[in-house]
Amino acid sequence: MRLREPMPALQGATEWLNGERSKEDLVGDKPTLIHFWSISCHLCKEAMPQVNEFRDNYSDKLNVVAVHMPRSEDDLDLDEIKKVAAEHDITQPIFVDSEHKLTDAFENQYVPAYYVFDKEGNLRHFQAGGSGMKMLEKRVNRVLDEIEKSE
């Protein structure tokens, strides 16, 4: 995905955990962070406490949706996905992307990966890798500041 491109439709999930969200639920409401992770990804698990803290600190200003992107056959076990999500306190909606439909729509190749969309649903920031939460927070704050200035 390129910057300023619209958010793809959140379609093709093999399952939703913690409630289902649609693009229509998110766009026009507030900015959205969509993060890709996988149960076999060590960096994803290491970063999850920071993602959760971020989710909780911005809960009134930011939508957060997790996408489970399998990297191998072992990652397709729904019970294991549920177990790891519970162990790592992933309480936001989880799009289980076992057929890579959303992964392909995002042209995403990485876990963890973070996509920040503005209130209108346009991509404003992308980053991949386990570190860089400070940069992510800076970018989210920039999008939030724009909303405050426009209101």
Image: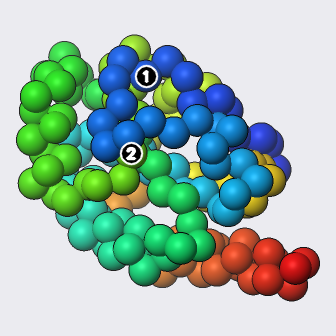
Q: Which residue is mark 2?
A: 93
Residue at the image point whose x is 21% and y is 21% from the top: 76
Disc 1 residue type (three-letter): Ala
Q: Quadrant of residue 9?
A: top right
Q: Quadrant of residue 68?
A: top left
Q: Quadrant of residue 7?
A: top right
Q: Residues within 10 Å of mark 1 (few under 14, many from 20)?
A: some
Residue at the image point whose x is 90% and y is 78% from the top: 150
Q: Residue 26: x and y, percent?
A: 64, 48
| Disc on the earlier residue, 1 or 2 | 1
Task: Locate the C terminus by quadrant.
Answer: bottom right
Q: Which residue is mark 1?
A: 13
Secondary structure found at label 1: loop
Q: Is residue 56 above or below residue 76?
A: below
Q: Residue 117: x and y, percent?
A: 68, 55
Q: Is residue 61 above or below residue 111?
A: below
Q: Is residue 8 visible?
A: yes
Of the pair 121 and 105, the residue shown nearer to us: 121
